[in-house]
Amino acid sequence: MSKADSGSTAVTDSDRAVLRTDGVTKRFGGLTAVDNVDIEIHSGEIVGLIGPNGAGKSTLFNCITGTLTPDEGRVYLQGEDVTDWPEHKIARAGLGRMFQETRIFGDMTVRENLLLAAQEGGANVGSLLRRPDSSLLSRTDELLDYVDLGGLSETRAGRMSFGQQKLLEFAMELMSEPEILLMDEPAGGINPSMLGNLIEYIRNANEEQESTIFLIEHNMDFVMDIADRIYVLAHGERIANGTPEEIQNDQRVLDAYLGRE
Ligand SMILES: Nc1ncnc2c1ncn2[C@@H]1O[C@H](COP(=O)(O)OP(=O)(O)OP(=O)(O)O)[C@@H](O)[C@H]1O
């Protein structure tokens, strides 16, 4: 049935979006950090969010994750209005977030970190680590293989390099099978020689684990390589939405980066 003849019960592309914001606005005193921003991300996409310093990227992320409540506008996760939900409830509904700094437990092994990431609130941590169920163990093996950390499963996580810790954190986020994973500068602080690997790991997860990913990134080569589509913010406003090629040729985007209004 076409959209035109499906009547009032029509399911639109917007309804099917994994994540959608509708006119999200956030002000800090007199400053409008995010100004009436609409975004829409569909299942299986890798979408980038770029913009000059202070453009409002982190504030938009924080409005989506429930860290901040928008002053205006709505946030929908899988079609459900989550705007006023607390952060932990939004996370449990399927929104994962990976921060710039890693938040692993350095004294625990790589595998223990992954097992903890799978734990639902209220689970008994001791028994989870002593007697993990076999499906959890096979999932940890699978994810460690994804990020080439299979050989380090019994290593203390704090002994690994920063890049490896980031990969572990990525695997930890995938452990809970989020509907969408928000990544805050995944390439930040990663050794340039490892960037190609990171792109490959994220792509593999996207294709094989069907992960949908929304990422803030300052590294242009990285984001242009990995994203299917990119949103650009400047002074809180969404100034562009397009493929990496379209974005690279968009005069408003070039002007925003060069500080021209
Ligand atoms: N808690 C806050 N209180 C007041 N102003 C804030 C707060 N958080 C952010 N801002 C301001 O809002 C604007 C947008 O900031 P935001 O951190 O979202 O930008 P960004 O695009 O993520 O920047 P960067 O790339 O530098 O991280 C900036 O002018 C910033 O100074």
Image (cartoon, rainbow, N blue to C red):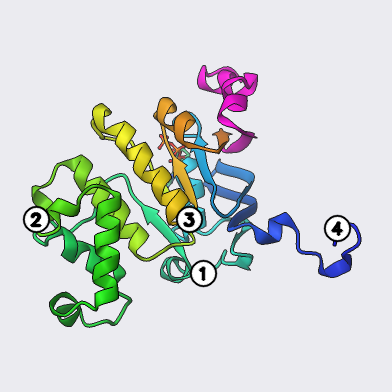
Label 1 is placed on what type of residue? Trp
Q: Earlier in the sequence, mark 2 or mark 1?
A: 1
Give the Cα distance between marks 4 and 2. 55 Å
Where does label 2 land, which residue? 155
| Disc 1 secondary structure class | loop
Q: Nearer the viewer, residue 261 or 257?
A: 257
The Cα–Cα distance between marks 2 and 1, rounded to whole angstroms, is 38 Å
- Report the residue at 18% width, 62% height from top: 111
Quarter-of-image position of residue 217: top left
Q: Which residue is mark 4?
A: 2
Q: Which residue is mark 3?
A: 210
Q: Tell me the residue at 50%/37% (across/down).
A: 227
Q: Are marks 1 and 4 in contact (CB under 8 Å)?
A: no
Residue 243 on the magenta span: yes
Measure how far apart labels 1 and 3 are at the Cα level.
26 Å
Q: Secondary structure at mark 4?
A: loop
Q: Quadrant of the C terminus?
A: top right
1 or 3: mark nearer the eye: 3
Mark 1 / mark 3, whichever is N-terminal:
1
Ligand 1 is found in the corner quadrant, namely top left
Hey, what amino acid is under mark 2?
Answer: Thr
Horizontal side of 243 relative to 150 (left or right) equals right
Give coordinates of residue 117: x percent, y percent. 28, 66
Marks 3 and 2, how far apart at CA: 28 Å
Taking 86 as reference, is 219 above or below it?
Answer: above
Badge 4: residue crowd in 10 Å (few <14, some 14–19, many ≥20): few
Along the polypeptide, which appears first: circle 4 or circle 2?
4
